[in-house]
Image (cartoon, grey):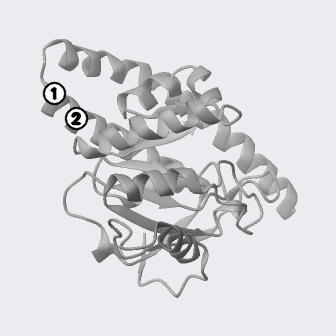
Amino acid sequence: MNDSMMNTLRTLAFFSWMWVVLFFSLLLLIPLNILGLLGMKQRQSRFIIKATKKWARHLIFTSGSKIRVSGRENIPKEPGYCVVANHQSNFDIPLIMTVLPDNAGFIGKYEMKKVPLLNSWMKALNCVFIKRDNIRQSIEGIKEALDQVQDGKTMVLFPEGTRSRNGIPGKFHQAGIRLALEAGVPVLPVTIKNSFNMFEKNKKIMPTHVEIVIHEMRKGFGQNINAAVSELINTVTKPIPAGDETK
């Protein structure tokens, strides 16, 4: 069997299994909702962390990929910060979920709100859905996400708005970064490299060595907001040094 056929079979098996796992996650929604109805918020939060992290790690493992991480010491010990990352692949969400120690919600496109089962788990993670073609609604959505950060939750923002699919950073929309810095919430810059090879490059699941670097936290913007926004974008998009850990 040649490599092309092997990769095709791997892709069919991956997506078939992914939907099987997602379907059976319906069973996990039952105790999740019961905990919510009983007002057991801390137990519900721990349940969400455990379930979603297992799902994320399982996706990466099933794809045959590995993650190399550097800068893990820069991750805060407590939630309540905004991750700003580049965006190469649909795998970026489970990749970040695998690396971060706490629950993280995502600022995602509105279309994801319509995906059965997946949308239930995204709502449980306090994800915010925005319409990319509606500037006013997008800004309001980002503000809603930042309000959650100020309430002690962690949110992830992809300023490019869509996947680059080729490893070359797309245009970074500055509004979300600017709002985060102006709000004074801690901002954790994250760079993802090679995740586009996992599927987007060949439209097939490909085992990939993904590199992730966690940069030093930013908070506020000093005297110049424009310079702070540009510096943060440059940090996220600069080349990644060799990682120090493989998972």
Q: Which mark is residue 45?
A: 2
> For this view, does 164 lie left or right of residue 67?
right
> For this view, does 55 lie left or right of residue 170?
left
Q: Position of residue 165 (x, y in %)?
A: 75, 58
Neighbourhood count class around disc 2 (C-alpha, 10 Å): few under 14, some 14–19, many 20 upward: some
Amino acid beneath label 1: Lys
Q: Secondary structure at mark 2?
A: helix
Q: Nearer the viewer, residue 105 or 3?
A: 105
Q: Nearer the viewer, residue 39 or 157?
A: 157
Residue at horizontal 61 percent and vertical 73 percent from the top: 237
Q: Which mark is residue 41?
A: 1
Q: Position of residue 171 (x, y in %)?
A: 71, 60
| Above or below 167: residue 160 | above
| Above or below 73: residue 143 | above
Label 1 and label 2: CA atoms lie apart by 6 Å
| Above or below 27: residue 212 | below
Q: Which mark is residue 241?
A: none
Q: Are marks 1 and 2 in contact (CB under 8 Å)?
A: yes
| Above or below 238: residue 3 | above
Q: Specify the farthest residue to the bottom.
A: 242
Residue at horizontal 51 percent and vertical 50 percent from the top: 176
Q: Quadrant of the C terminus?
A: bottom left
Neighbourhood count class around disc 1 (C-alpha, 10 Å): few under 14, some 14–19, many 20 upward: few
